[in-house]
Amino acid sequence: MTATEVLELVRQLPREEKLQVLEALAHALRADLQAPPSAPAGTDLATAATALREEYLANPELTAFTVLDGEELHETR
């Protein structure tokens, strides 16, 4: 269900029920804002890099293009 559909359903509720929905949403939003993030930014990338480290060390085809790291890059348009 989309946000637009939810809003349309809420508009059809009696005023008292709209207030209950609003209070429930405010409570849920406060809880979301107070909860610590599930994982610090970059954690997934660090985990992936650690998991693939041995593969990159053992397979030279995965790092073949690093030979070009020291060369100047010239952009063509």
Image (tube, grey):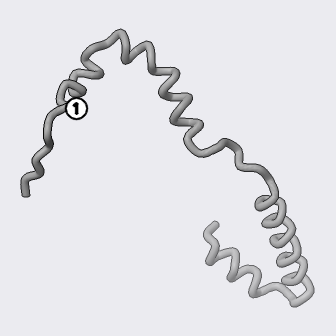
The residue that disc 1 covers is 69
Residue at the extreme top: 58
Which picture quadrant has residue 21? Answer: bottom right
Q: Quadrant of the N terminus?
A: bottom right
**Residue at 82% from the left image edge and 65% from the top image edge:** 30
Q: Quadrant of the C terminus?
A: bottom left
- Measuring from the top left, give residue 73's x and y in whole percent: 14, 43
- Does 24 appear above or below 73? below
Residue at the extreme left: 76
Q: Nearer the viewer, residue 32 or 7?
A: 32
**Residue at 77% from the left image edge and 61% from the top image edge:** 33
- Does 68 appear above or below 53? below
Residue at the extreme bottom: 15
- Measuring from the top left, give residue 11's x and y in whole percent: 75, 87
**Residue at 86% from the left image edge and 68% from the top image edge:** 27
- Residue type pointed to by label 1: Asp
- Measuring from the top left, give residue 67's x and y in whole percent: 19, 24
- Does 70 appear above or below 17? above
Task: Specify whether 66 is left or right of 11.
Answer: left
Q: Nearer the viewer, residue 28 or 53?
A: 53
Which picture quadrant has residue 72? Answer: top left
Task: Specify whether 43 is left or right of 34.
Answer: left
- Measuring from the top left, give residue 24's x and y in whole percent: 86, 70
Q: Residues within 10 Å of mark 1 (few under 14, many from 20)?
A: few
Task: Specify whether 4 is left or right of 75.
Answer: right
Q: Nearer the viewer, residue 15 or 63?
A: 63
> Tag 1, which secondary structure?
helix
Which picture quadrant has residue 4? Answer: bottom right
